[in-house]
Amino acid sequence: MDTQATAETGGLGRRTLLRLGAAGGLSAAVVGAKVFAVPGLEKGGLLNADGAFAGTSTALSDLLFYIETYPTSPLIMSPFKDPLTVPQALRPTPLSEFSAWPQPPGPGVGQQNSLGNEQHQIWTKTINCPDPIVYKIELMVRPHSFTSSKVLPIDAAGKPTVSFDSTGKTYAAGTVRDLPPSTIYGFNGTFPGPMINAEYGKPALVRFVNRLDENELGLDRQDFGAPDWSFLTHLHNGHTAPESDGNPHYTMNYGPKTHGYLPQTWCDNLYLNWPAGNDDREKQSFFWFHDHRMDHTGANVYKGMVGLYPIYDPKGKLDMGDERYGLRLPGVRRNHADGSFDVDYDIPLAFYDTRLDDGVTTHKDVHDALGEYPAVKNPATHPEWWGKTFFKHFPSHGFVGDIFTINGTAYPVLNVKRRKYRFRFLDASVSRIYEFKLMSSTKGPKSAVSLGYSGDELDGQYRIPDGQECMKFVQIASDGGLLPFPITRSSFELWPAKRREVIIDFTKYADGTPTTKGDVVYLTNVMKMPNGRKWADSSRFSPDPAYKVPMLKFVIGDAAPDYSVMPPPNRLMRALPPLPSNWRTLMDNRLIFEVERGSAGADVEWLINGKPFEPATVASSLKNPAGKSPLAQQKKNSFNLWEIRNGGGGWVHPFHLHMEEHRTVMRNGRDVSLKADPGHPEDVSREDLVALDPSESVIVYRGFRDFHGPYVAHCHNLAHEDHAMMFGWEIT
């Protein structure tokens, strides 16, 4: 199904173009899309009978699909002035309100969506839980500002340059400006969207309503975001039935039977808040929800479709958000009469990099040739979009921004008490990987421009040249929830979609010296990543001692009561589900999936086992040691080994497996089931995303419990996912 084909493109859709391969793709695009690259191809000798594709695939891709040029965002003049947004819990919809809806939630046939064609596979009473707490979230077109600071327009060399306003009026180089708001598609119109504080044993049902066709503020939608304004919400990595999972392998074949839910439709996603196999050891602690619309996940997430979902465990008061009980992790719980609650000193941090338009960079990629955004008349420059979010659907490696934001604000400040805090880290970026340290700086942040940097070295905008590590993190959780034991860390990496939870003690420095009121600590990124391929420098690989980008400024204030306890290294927090003693006997019959570039090269297409994602198809494994290539079908309540291979080429891939967490048992042929690889210490925990370094192979043990139906697995570099690096699998 290639529903993105349009009259403007002669019926040629992007996925069709990819399937045609290099030769077919070029000829079809030239004829059907009347692409604007023809003069360049002729000049390069690529269109004559003998010379077609004589050039490199990289040159072809550059000419045909996109210009690999990015704008340089204007310099934020006053960083670390705007306060960090600390999300408050979304309040549930009262029974009196949702029971009066024309189509109220419920377990019956046709009650899962507005189309009336789906039913919840498991309702709460089936698992002896109460009726779900109901929330309503609307997808809305709204403005969003990343900073209140004045900005200075600069070019790639760091020099002041001209800028524009929404009418196209030109402002002379050196003119300091206010930054215009960007247009977002937001859950309830905010970025990030609402935070739902959930609890095990208390299911939640979220009605997602699509209002993206409504634009009462008359905002310019620009040239990214799903062109049909559809959405598909995935609770990453909720243990949910397929109809509530928000994955395109399900949605293209059931429910809406298209890429996502269209405007003026709704769906009820039922989050049972129930661990896999009803096993307490499978409980998690931090989800997030985001868009998963086929082919435009990256665009929709970058457009703002991000929400937060911490989940607490009240059983035995182990981790209920009250530091007086259980593990005594930082958190002071405040209950509300409607059943919702907030937790002070327990703060989610959603990291997101963005890039702002300079008004002179040409917008040009395959989506323009396909006519998906005809109103913007690309290829073109857009001076009217100066200072607003810039996105490229079809970058060669992945999309990275040069402004770093947390909870929707660039370079915020957080005033903290002299006590311990729990921070829940989430990488909500399209492609960027971060590595964090806690640093002090006597002289404070200096702009990269003032330090003489230019080009990619401007990414992050600011440096702390005299930055010194001053505190450590105590990591207590990863993607799959609480770790077996805490890990003290000087730094940690955060890959796209991954979560890490840490405790920071603001009462003392790493050497034991007490902090004092007014002290400043910077959360600092030390991983340089100039494009979506992989890092250029990090602690694990050729660190750059000069790359110290402050992202969040902590200002230490007065002391506050603190009943939390730092878990000691030998404190068991969450026992791991046991591996079967004979897990190695499953090796010969494991399922094998290799992620790789398409044969066209130039990162035009991303494949798994040599094939692009086809939503109607269940993928097949590569031939395993037993000589079989089984379908990616697993029996309900079974377990198996899956191997995920990085096909090489110098890329990294954050590979996400929907539905249940896994245990890593082997990395690069070495058993890590008992002792993790030093570069990936979380391998000892449960995770939902495999971090694949270049050319790595990872074998995981995972279960397939409680539900049946179609799911997906995919790269969470969203540029890769949107260009076919995904496969469908199912539980039978």
Image: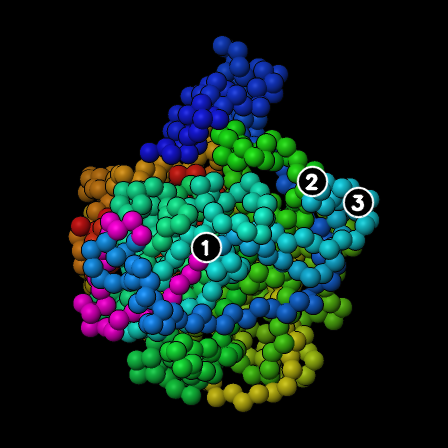
Instruction: State which region is magenta.
Output: 114-138
Gap between marks 2 and 1 measured at Cα: 28 Å
Residue 628 visible, this angle: yes
Q: Residues within 10 Å of mark 3 (few under 14, many from 20)?
A: some
Residue at image position (51%, 58%) is 189
Residue underneath mark 3: 171
Gap between marks 2 and 3 measured at Cα: 11 Å
Helix, strand or loop at mark 1: strand
**313 relative to 31, above or below:** below
Gap between marks 3 and 1 measured at Cα: 35 Å
User: Which x, y percent locates residue 311?
Assistant: 38, 71
Task: State which quadrant residue 95 falls in.
Answer: bottom left
Q: Could you tell which of marks 2 and 1 lies nearer the N-terminus?
A: 1
Residue underneath mark 2: 383
Q: Residues within 10 Å of mark 2 (few under 14, many from 20)?
A: many
Residue 543 visible, this angle: no
User: Which x, y percent locates residue 584?
Assistant: 23, 56
**322 relative to 697, above or below:** below
The answer to the question of whether label 2 and label 3 lie on touching residues, with beta carbons closer than 8 A, is no
The label on residue 139 is 1
Which residue type does callout 3 highlight? Tyr
Foreground tag (2 vs 1):
1
116 falls in the magenta region: yes
Which residue type does callout 1 highlight? Leu
Front-lying residue, 11 or 681: 11
Q: Is residue 550 left or right of residue 295?
A: right
Task: State which quadrant residue 124 falls in.
Answer: bottom left
Helix, strand or loop at mark 2: helix
61 falls in the magenta region: no
Magenta: main secondary structure: loop
Which residue type does callout 2 highlight? Pro
Q: Could you tell which of marks 2 and 3 lies nearer the N-terminus?
A: 3
